[in-house]
Image (cartoon, rainbow, N blue to C red):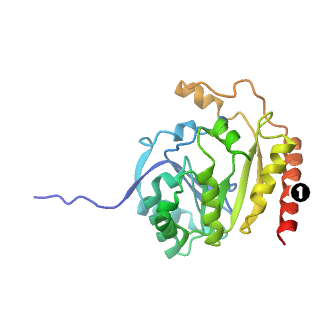
Amino acid sequence: MKTECSSALKGRIHSTESFGTVDGPGVRFVVFFQGCPMRCQYCHNPDTWEPHGGTEMTVDELLTEYRRNKNFYKNGGITATGGEPLMQLPFLTELFQKAKAEGIHTCLDTSGIMYRRERDTEFQSLFQNLDLVLLDFKHSSPEGHLKLTGQKQEHILEFAQALEKARIPMIVRHVVVPGITDGAEHLTALGHLIGKFRNLKGLEVLPYHTMGVAKYKNLGIPYPLEGLENMDPARAKEAREILLNAIRETRRQLS
């Protein structure tokens, strides 16, 4: 007797979080995608880098998990994070298409590194089912971005431009790292850079922490920022004010 194989698209998922409260509005079902091309020096999820790791899952399996706690997500929704979800664009698009069909708020936490203008048609299918983007801006300059992440900055800027054109609300996230991304000159330049985007709706300044160091040891990977101490939360607040002032300055010039 012949057995039929399922043709359902499968994604590689690192893990899920049932009650996330820091990755988008409200209480959220957070899906951590496996695979990332970035090698950020402060990354706290090195176990998500390998694209062939994780567990294969279908969209329906993920939505079944979501439905188990559906009543808790009334003011929340689903957030795709990683890793880098855009590495699995077809799967991510299907997840958000089916989520929107059920009236679920969709949020994408991404660096935007996988965006390519020549693939814009594919991205438009995602944008049609995307409510909010948490966009990680790593550095204010192309040189600093390349040194910090191992990847060029240009595609992140192109992705932000595509989001603006599609009128998708964007919240910028920036990790403040002592001695690397906490300088006033850098922060001011970053504020000027992101302040020009009219779809910018929020700013999250995240203080550097060392909670991921143990993962590097477990994986046998040297930690690039070995010995660097946690960022003082008070200093992170100061950094946010510098960024906000630069954003306001840019917006005054544009108005």
Question: Between 61 and 119, which is closer to the camera in this rendering?
Answer: 119
Question: Label 1, on which residue?
Answer: 245
Please provide percent x and percent y for residue 44.
63, 38
Q: Quadrant of the C terminus?
A: bottom right
Residue 126 located left or right of residue 234: left
The 10 Å Cα crowd at callout 1, few under 14, some 14 to 19, many 20 or more, is some
Residue 245 located left or right of residue 30: right
Please provide percent x and percent y for residue 35.
49, 44
Please provide percent x and percent y for residue 7.
29, 61
Element marked by disc 1: helix
Whether residue 171 is visible = yes
Whether residue 43 is visible = no
Q: Is residue 217 above or below residue 194?
A: above
Please provide percent x and percent y for residue 126.
51, 67
Residue at point 65%, 72% (across, down): 167
In the image, what residue type sits under mark 1? Answer: Asn
Question: Between 189 and 220, which is closer to the camera in this rendering?
Answer: 189
Residue 126 located left or right of residue 255: left
